[in-house]
Image (cartoon, grey):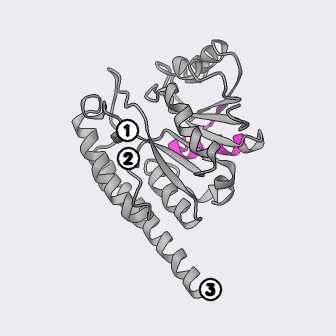
Amino acid sequence: MYRDLRIAVVIPAYNEARAIVDAVATVPAFVDHVLVIDDASHDDTREQAGVGARRRAGSVEVIRHTQNRGVGGAITTGYRRALELDADVAVVMAGDGQMDPEDLPALLAPLANGTADYVKGNRFKHPEVWTAMPATRIVGNVLLSAATRVTSGYRHVFDSQCGYTAIHRRALAAIELDELFPRYGYPNDLLSRLHVAGVRVVDVPVRPIYGDHWKSGIHLGTVLHPLPWVLLRSWGTRLAAQARRRVQS
């Protein structure tokens, strides 16, 4: 528990057997529930998550998808389970070990203070970003973040692809989880839907971590499809919702 908030950490994992042990074992002790979502991995991610669970004092649950649903689909499964467990906040930490557990209190503080409903990490606010983040990743993130500022409506938010996030249960209740885009592009779609729901979003600095086996999810295929379609759909959904509100008022 963190300042009277019950915390669940959702760890989406697909073929993360190499990193998942440490990702699970290093989740801070104040976290009430750790939920590993094995998204139909072909390796022994599930078994290795169990090894990590035995190294951590506290509740760890491993949920396995029989078919791959994408990172957004895995996170949605974790959100639903967090709500079932009466968690006040659901945090997303990737299974690849690229999120520093020491940054977690900074993500939770705005929620505990009542100044935000959704908090996301922003690696560009951290002084190490220019030396730690690969150049190709910097370029891709800057372009996608600029586009997401327009489509989501959150002009103050940057580093849209950073998956290190914390969301209050009241924000989860304000959106339709079934409608979230399930695959790459999920965070861009989520931001747009949160804006429609009037959710308060803030960025906080988080440390960028890239290991020797890092592989970017941003490549020509994602630039051409599905990201442009996701961004356009999210933009259209937000504008349509705003138009309906103007008519109703």
In the image: residue 46, left or right of residue 222? right
- Amino acid under disc 1: Arg
Mark closest to the chain's N terminus, 3 or 1? 1
- Amino acid under disc 2: Asp
* Residue receiving disc 2: 159
Q: Position of residue 114 (x, y in %)?
A: 63, 50
Location of residue 172 with respect to 13 vertically, above or below: below
Could you classify mark 3 by the number of other residues whose Cα lies within 10 Å: few (under 14), some (14-19), or many (20 or more)?
A: few
* Residue receiving disc 3: 248
* Residue receiving disc 1: 123
What's drawn in magenta, residue-wise? 63-82
- Of 201 and 79, the residue lying toward us: 201
Mark closest to the chain's N terminus, 1 or 2? 1
In the image: residue 5, left or right of residue 194? right
Q: Position of residue 208 (x, y in %)?
A: 37, 31
Q: Main SS of the magenta segment? A: helix
Task: Check whether the beta carbons of the residues at disc 3 and disc 1 lie within 8 A of each other.
Answer: no
Q: Position of residue 102 (x, y in %)?
A: 51, 25
The answer to if 46 sits in the magenta stretch is: no
Disc 2 element: loop
Task: Check whether the beta carbons of the residues at disc 1 and disc 2 lie within 8 A of each other.
Answer: yes
In the image: residue 185, left or right of residue 216? right
One can see residue 43 in this view: yes
Disc number for residue 235: none
In this view, the residue farthest toward the front is 113
